[in-house]
Image (tube, coloured by chain):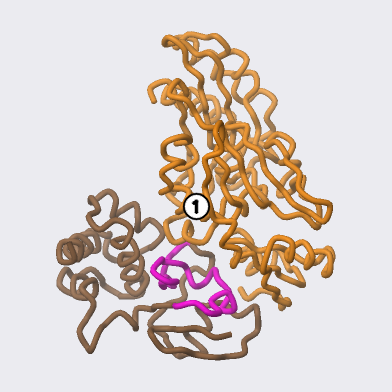
């Protein structure tokens, strides 16, 4: 398979049963993408396939052949954080940080689809990303800030 | 949580998928969006020896206006169904329900054809397609055939699809401005399966009900129509809705599991059928 991850093209021979999240973490060593529930509920493994958020625990690596994947480690540009990362930082939108990579990728995908979401729309769009620390308040604030910046 | 090893084939076309199904026999399994199949493979409840991937069949991702109905390609992602203008204008219940399945990331992968072919009676889409009296187009080695929703769902995770057949299209009627609809899903957490779901499509005339079609989720081994309620609603006035809804669980066979008892499901079916019809009347 050949896949472009965070702008770099890779070629690997992999077992068909290798899940995308394990390919990213164990073959490419991109451990910023987390493994959470393994059953597409929690969102810790969220990455972008093209421009759309997907759960990398519920996709086989071979299915990404010829496609473009972006992980949380590929969104900063020239050492500058992505506005969503800055917004999470400034709003203290994390405590333990485990859900954060997935939250950030799902939030970036959300703003692509809906650049000016209401608070309710933000909460709905993040229903597939669990955070067990923050109670979501600051995450919602961070997405609101990022939406303001990019609008 | 790693699936059993399997061989992987990419279908280049529907005909190629049919050919591959013939070549690999009964242990081969089609994969569309994979959001039902991959989790059960990871849990090793399913262990196909060959996966035939439909993911590249972009020509099956479409919504077309066919006059009195919409034709939707089987590989149309739930998110695309949700946002599609034709669906929003002509078949609101379908777009609404597509936006309710899983979450946005799941909807980016999951497909309309896939969720129907999976045939889970706890899935939301099968009961919505049943209430719409939609048609499923399938293609096999002997060509194409169409199957009505009531004939498509045979049993728990079991459909009318033959071993070498592929779902290619789903057809749903265009709803008129006199048609109200509602899909009500009762679950404990936002992403859970429906403990009970009720899809209602109600034809209205002069403030009364002309006819109603009601599909129930999680009330048996397939999506089930609430036929007794449908009959009671034929020509009914709005003040007869509550009584009609009281027979919503007639002829159903809900199970008992960790989420709810069969008795509670029957209660929920009656309550949510009433609420769904009331919402449909106001929409």
Secondary structure, mark 1, is helix
> Where does residue B246 sit, x and y in percent of width and height?
56, 18
Reply above or below: A39 against B173. below
Quarter of the rendering containing residue B47:
bottom right
Left or right, A103 with respect to B51, comes to left
- Residue wearing tag 1: B78
Image coords of residue B113 (percent x, y)? 62, 51
- The stretch in magenta equals A41-68
Q: Nearer the viewer, residue B75 or B6?
A: B75
Residue shown at the point (47%, 68%) measured from the top left: A55
Chain with brown colouring? A
Rendered view: B95 above or below B226? below
Identity of the residue drawn at 65% across and 79% down: A16
Q: Identify the residue at image location x=60%, y=19%.
A: B230
Direction from residue B129 to residue B282 in the image, left or right:
left
Residue A8, position as x, y percentages in the image: 41, 89
Image colour for chain B is orange
Q: Quadrant of the C terminus of chain A?
A: bottom left
Which is more toward the observer, B86 or A150?
B86
């Amino acid at each position: 398979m050949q896949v472009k991850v965070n702008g770099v093209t890779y070629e690997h021979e992999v077992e068909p049963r290798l899940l995308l999240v394990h390919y990213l973490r164990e073959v490419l060593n991109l451990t910023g993408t987390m493994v959470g529930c393994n059953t597409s509920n929690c969102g810790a493994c969220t990455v972008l396939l093209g421009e759309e958020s997907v759960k990398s625990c519920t996709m086989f690596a071979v299915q990404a052949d010829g496609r473009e994947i972006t992980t949380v480690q590929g969104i900063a540009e020239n050492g500058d954080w992505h506005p969503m990362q800055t917004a999470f930082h400034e709003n203290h939108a994390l405590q333990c940080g485990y859900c954060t990579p997935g939250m950030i990728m799902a939030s970036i995908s959300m703003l692509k689809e809906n650049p000016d979401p209401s608070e309710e729309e933000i909460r709905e769009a993040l229903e597939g990303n669990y955070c067990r620390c923050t109670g979501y308040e600051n995450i919602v604030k961070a997405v609101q800030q990022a939406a303001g910046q990019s609008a | 949580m790693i699936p059993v090893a399997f061989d992987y084939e990419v279908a280049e076309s529907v005909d190629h998928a049919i050919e591959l199904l013939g070549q690999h026999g009964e242990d081969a399994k089609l994969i569309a969006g994979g959001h039902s199949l991959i989790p059960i493979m990871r849990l090793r409840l399913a262990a196909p020896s060959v996966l035939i991937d439909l993911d590249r069949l972009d020509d099956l991702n479409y919504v077309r206006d066919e006059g009195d109905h919409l034709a939707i390609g089987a590989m149309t992602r739930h998110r695309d169904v949700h946002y599609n203008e034709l669906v929003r204008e002509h078949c609101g219940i379908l777009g609404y329900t597509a936006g309710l399945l899983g979450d946005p990331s799941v909807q980016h992968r999951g497909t309309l054809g896939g969720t129907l072919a999976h045939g889970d009676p706890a899935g939301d889409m099968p009961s919505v397609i049943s209430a719409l009296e939609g048609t499923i187009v399938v293609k096999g080695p002997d060509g194409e055939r169409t199957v009505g929703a009531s004939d498509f769902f045979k049993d728990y995770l079991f459909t009318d699809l033959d071993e070498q057949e592929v779902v290619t299209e789903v057809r749903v009627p265009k709803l008129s401005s006199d048609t109200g609809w509602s899909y009500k899903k009762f679950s404990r957490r936002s992403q859970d399966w429906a403990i009970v779901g009720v899809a209602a499509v109600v034809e209205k005339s002069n403030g009364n009900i002309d006819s109603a079609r009601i599909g129930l989720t999680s009330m048996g081994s397939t999506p089930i129509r609430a036929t007794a309620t449908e009959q009671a609603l034929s020509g009914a006035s709005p003040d007869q809705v509550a009584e009609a809804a009281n027979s919503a669980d007639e002829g159903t066979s809900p199970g008992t599991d960790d989420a709810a008892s069969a008795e509670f499901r029957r209660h929920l079916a009656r309550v949510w059928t009433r609420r769904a019809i009331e919402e449909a009347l106001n929409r």
